[in-house]
Image: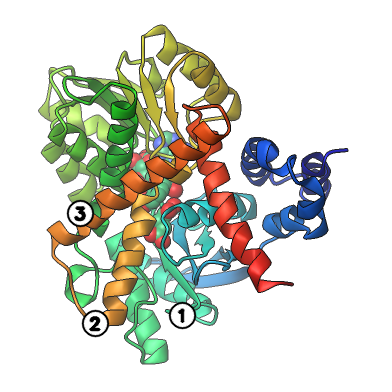
Amino acid sequence: MSYINEVLELVEKKYPAELEFKQAVTEVFESLRVVIEKDEAAYRRDAILERLVAPDRQIAFRVNWVDDAGNIQVNNGYRVQFNNALGPYKGGLRFRDNVNLSIIKFLGFEQVFKNALTGLPIGGGKGGSDFDPKGKSDREIMAFCQAFVTELSRYIGADIDVPAGDIGVGAREIGYMYGQYKRLTSEFTGVLTGKGIPYGGSLARTEATGYGLLYFTDAMLKANGLSFEGKKVSISGSGNVAIYAAQKAYELGATVIAMSDSAGYIVDESGIDLELIKELKEVKRARISEYVTTKPGAKYVAGGSIWEVKVDVALPCATQNELHLEDAKALVANGCLAVAEGANMPTTMDATHYLQENGVLFAPGKASNAGGVATSQLEMAQNSARLKWTFEEVDAKLKTIMENIFKQAHEAAVKYDKPTDYVLGANVAGFEKVVEVMRIHGV
Ligand code: NDP
Ligand code: 2IT
């Protein structure tokens, strides 16, 4: 049996219930066949794939906190430190009711290759909790964040493991977690990124994932003789990544006509009013359905799939497995030119294959959404040097990093005779960097 199949079987046997983790491993390993099969004996001898699928360590802990009614609440907390070949573990924290070990492991596994693609010295990790921030008071959020970090603080550090935000974790949560970490340790270091600007955060980190997605996609479109100018765009989600993807899409001359949250989507053919979305989502923490009360010309569809909307470019920026085969068929039927992932693994494998087979340019998240973590590393660099770069400086570095990631994915795809297969290109380019250093470090 081929080495890749052997390790895929091993993963199936060891972790039968970890659906998302198995999906992420399968997707990466299928791309790696072209590389591994050229030199199978050496990869097998060094147990490279077995070592890549087993995190360095995975930490699971209990989080107790007290709600506003005085009741004790109990949640699960996780931090999976996946691989630190290239630098300290780095990756976000997700607070969402569906969080489990499989989701955190898939995110950590992806993060290893994503972080390698940035070219910056960061390893990969991920964490989070099944705590559901929806409907919680500000005090409850603070209480949870403090309890979570009280436990997490044992395992992290500016040179060990540096968490950041992800779904359900933004500037407010990072602020409460940083405050508690500081109280516990007396340290003022870059132990978390995505910090507020007044206490060590980097300018442009808030915008970075969305902007970076657009820089990558713009590079991909241009390499294929296309551009954003005059294009219609749909963006799923209306959180951090989606909002700043939309902002940069407008700057590049496109019109964003559809956005969503987990309850439904809106369509505004005249172009979504982004200031209104920011007010609803960043200030009021309201539902996207409220958009149509201010904009009666727009339409709200409860449930349903945003991918039914006819657009030139689709940007899934919400969550994993949100774009299915049926959605891919609808996009192709409507003449969509490109799909670029702002979220992690938003497109199912069969949907990805369908899009690629039907000539839709496809940007995999581990390449196209790497701008967030890249700018987190720029925040770490500023914290270590105890200085602050301007917005323009950080944004310029981000743009260069994203263009370089596109170049690496493109060149690796060309090398293996599949010039527009950026999934293959990104997986191979990230893998090669991590494996080179794993070998240097020995066992
Ligand atoms: P936010 O919490 O800011 O926003 C998440 C958005 O996605 C919300 O609009 C939310 O809607 C929606 N959403 C969440 N779950 C679902 C679901 N099951 N179905 C439909 N919509 C859903 O998170 P981010 O914007 O930070 O993250 C979005 C994605 O981008 C995630 O996959 C994350 O891993 C990825 N990512 C984030 C980075 C970052 O720097 N923040 C960096 C790289 C990737 P609702 O309000 O209804 O919950
Ligand atoms: O998925 C991701 O890359 C993130 N959530 C950002 C991680 C980070 O450390 O900034």
Left or right: where 66 falls relative to 388: right
**Residue 443: which quarter of the image?**
bottom right
Displayed quadrant of residue 348: top right
- Judge whether residue 56 can be spotted in this image: no
Label 3 C-beta lies within 8 Å of the nearest ligand 2 atom: no
Instruction: Measure how far apart labels 2 and 1 are at the Cα level.
Output: 17 Å
> Residue 423: percent from the left, percent from the top?
52, 35
User: Residue 35, position in %: x, y?
Assistant: 67, 41
Q: Are marks 1 and 3 in contact (CB under 8 Å)?
A: no
Mark 2 lies on residue: 386
**The residue positioned farthest toward the right in the image shown:** 1
* Type of the residue with mark 2: Arg
Lower position in the chain sequence, tag 2 or tag 3:
2
**Depth-wise, is mark 2 or mark 3 nearer the camera?**
3
Q: Amino acid at mark 1?
A: Gly
- In primary-sequence order, the first of circles 2 and 1 is 1
Residue at which label 3 appears: 396
Task: Name the mark on residue 157.
Answer: 1
